[in-house]
Image (cartoon, rainbow, N blue to C red):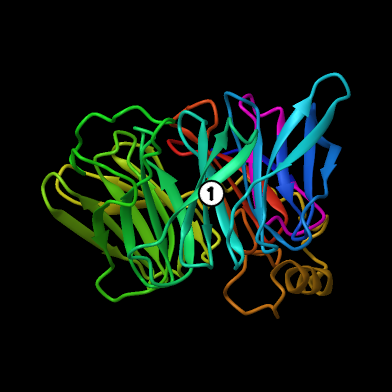
Amino acid sequence: MGVLDEYNFPFCVTAHAFNRDKTQVAVCPNSNEVHIYSRGGAQWALTHVLKEHDLLVTSIDWASQTNRIVTCSQDKNAYVWTLDQAGNVWKPTLVHLRIHRAATQAKWSPQENKFAVASGDKCVAICYFGEDNDWWVSKHIRQPIASTVLCVDWHPNNVLIACGGTDMKARVLSAYIKGVDQKPAPTAWGERLPFNTLCGEFESPAGGWVHSVAFSPDGEAVAFVTHDSTLTVATPATGEVVSVRSSSLPQLALVWPDQRTIVASGHDCSPMVYTHDGAAWRLAKKLGEDDKSRRSATASPSNSNSAFNLFRQMDSRSQPAKAGAAAGDGSLKSVHQNTITEMHRDPAGNPAEISTSGLDGKLVQWSVRA
């Protein structure tokens, strides 16, 4: 069984992040708020609501070691949230981003001493704690970025970042901060890595916005998915750039569970597992579609009520039902019934587990190897 756990929220989930032991989850209900739920048995109970942002929250990342949360929003701001144990209250610290367009994604570095914020301001803000000013400050990576940055990811060495966006390029750049980072060991991406050094630039054969980008667990390769329904994997040590075209709808999220496995998900509603067989990357399976015993949390109590099923499908997918696209009860064969908006690796580092959230309100934990 691919599904380990499945829960339905009564709203679209546009972003989510678990704490380290997955007893708490932070979700964005498609608004300017972040809701934190705690697990009690099989249910999730709302415990905190974070309300500092003025516009839609676009990204949430929960640091597994320091237990800090970073959020960013279309209001051009980012906040670092720290739990006050005495009062059981999450306290925000405003980050000095210095951007003039919406922030699109935020992600902690592996050592959790800095984080990156992608934005529509044609830059990536590398944020770190300024001891002199006692707040979070930023330094911008701008060249050669030519348009909105949609996604970022950190290299395991805590110095390099990968980013991609609407200029149809995926890039690897240096985010080295003097006084914060130690000099990194040489990698296939280069040896001398001053701030804003371009280490690699890639694009898919047919072009398309880069929706998600991720380094391999060892940092020796980078993968990205684009709006032309293509997965591209670049390996600088060999100079190899491999693209795998898909007949499905475009993917929006991408993770590497392990060195030979990539999972991508998005508009097709099912996580797609790609594996390397020693010669090439190939689509191995779609998660969830072979689970015949799965019952959706929103399933109708009776399959005979066709009118109910029709309206339920229209509500969950925001479009009329189409013949041949649904299972017998009127729902899609996939676990998610609408676009998967975000996907994360297991925060404790288990390579076999991932989590997804989507516009259908579902939060699903998966076993990739099931």
Q: Residue furthest right?
A: 87
| Magenta segment boundaries in residue numbering | 8-24
Q: Front-most of 51 and 337?
A: 51
Q: Front-most of 162 and 259?
A: 162
Q: Residues within 10 Å of mark 1 (few under 14, many from 20)?
A: many
Q: Amino acid at mark 1?
A: Gly
Residue 310 against residue 50 in the figure, above or below: below
* Residue of label 1: 288
In the rendered structure, the answer to whether residue 253 lies left or right of residue 281 reads right
Residue 223 against residue 316 in the figure, above or below: above
Residue 304 position in % (x across, y down): 80, 66
Say if the magenta span includes residue 144.
no
Residue 358, picture quadrant: bottom right
In the rendered structure, the answer to whether residue 41 lies left or right of residue 246 reads right
Q: Main secondary structure of the magenta part?
A: loop
Which image quadrant: the N terminus?
top right
Residue 45 position in % (x across, y down): 85, 36
Residue 260 against residue 28 in the figure, above or below: above
Residue 305 against residue 139 in the figure, above or below: below
> Residue shown at 28%/76% (left/top)?
206
Residue 4, picture quadrant: top right
Residue 149 position in % (x across, y down): 47, 63
Which SS class for mark 1?
loop
Q: Front-most of 16 and 83?
A: 83
Q: Residue furthest left?
A: 238
Residue 167 position in % (x across, y down): 38, 73
Say if the magenta span includes residue 18.
yes
In the rendered structure, the answer to whether residue 69 lies left or right of residue 44 reads left
